[in-house]
Image (tube, helix red, strand yellow):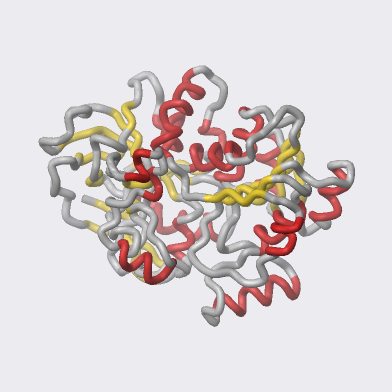
Amino acid sequence: MRANCFVSKSTMQVERVPDPKILNDRDAIVKITSTAICGSDLHLYNGFIPTVESGDIFGHEFMGEVVETGKGVKNLKKGDRVVVPFPIACGSCYQCGRKMFSICENSNPNAWMAEKLMGHSPSGIFGYSHMLGGFPGGQAEYARVPFADVGPLKIPDDMPDEQVLFLSDIFPTGYMGAEMCDIKPGDVIAVWGCGPVGQFAIASAYLLGAERVIAIDRFPYRLRMAREKAKAETINYEEQDVYETLKEMTGGRGPDSVIDAVGMEAHAAGAVGAYDRVKQAMMLENDRPHALRQAIMACRSGGTVSVIGVYSGFIDKFPMGSLMNRSLTLKTGQCHVHRYMKPLLERVRKGEIDPSFVITHRVELEEAPEMYRIFRDKQDECVKVVLKP
């Protein structure tokens, strides 16, 4: 089969690789009809996630048609259309029993690697380094899906791929980010980052009852999407002081809750940005946490800081004094996608949201390597790329 494979830092290549096979009774093989490039794939592409090897197949947002199942998979059959959640979860461990699927205790066979590098291991994840399982990803013609009796969600035939593909990751991730804010009527929410996850965090905050959502970014085309598609008020942080502007927009108090949808590669101008880049390059901190620092400082006292941007390890100059002394609540996590797929599918079916609004590029699988570069470099007003194997 054809698959989009990592070659070296900032280099991908579509190659011929062996077709996946059933390895366990609870496996399924899915013929992929749609897959996507995620912002967190860029962390791998840019070399910030360790244990990525040449030949690894990327991609954790995918859906398709079941073509084969193991003997233990009774809930799926050949021909079923399914969306596959990016965390791999066994469904029976302590954490899965609590619906905390992204910290499944059984699905990462290389948990020891993650524990050594990060302190603890999350679940296995498709196409996301060997420390998170080494599972081949979904930017390919086929994929093996472990624990297929737990993860994949069957999709009605009358719903097109583009309406449901993002149930695999970015829609539930944005929704969970908003849900963790415990939104009350009248609340004002601020979202850092207007990439695809940020767009869904904005839309989800409104679904959950926010009165106003303010989005922060620096790219005009992403801010325009946030205004026109997700209905946010916007701040361009290269043109306005974010802290002071948010205070002015909220009567001097600050947003009721804030969402960091940026993560480890946050951009910052001036001395702070240079500091983080040097520290990260010298491996003295793993991540550039400028957006997180700013979100904490801007949140109103007694508010909630929701973190859904991906972080990999240790950060510097964390404003713990502000967090503690102002009674802020910090909530975080890789999304527990399985928990949200059915409820969000119903919201899509009812017409409450059409997730396809974030798509800007639809291309064949062969164009994936070039689209990684375009997406990373913020060219051609690229927000979300869907690949058609």
Q: Can residue 387 be seen in this view?
A: no
253 relative to 161 in the view: left or right = right
Nearest the camera: 234 or 283? Answer: 283
Query: In percent of the image, x 75 and y 58: which residue is there?
Result: 325
Query: In percent of the image, x 18 and y 49: which residue is there?
Result: 20
Q: Is residue 310 visible?
A: yes
Relative height, residue 281 to residue 100 (above, below)? below
* Image quadrant occupied by the C terminus: top left
Q: Quadrant of residue 223?
A: top right
Relative height, residue 323 to residue 355 (above, below)? below
Q: Where is residue 357 in the image (x, y as percent from the top left)?
A: 56, 34
Q: Where is residue 348 in the image (x, y as percent from the top left)?
A: 49, 24
Q: Where is residue 328 in the image (x, y as percent from the top left)?
A: 70, 51
Q: Position of residue 239 (x, y in %)?
A: 81, 56
Q: Residue furthest left?
A: 71
Q: Quadrant of residue 202?
A: top right
Labels in figure, total:
0
Relative height, residue 34 to residue 315 (above, below)? above
59 relative to 277 in the view: left or right = left
Query: In percent of the image, x 25 and y 52: which residue is there?
Result: 2
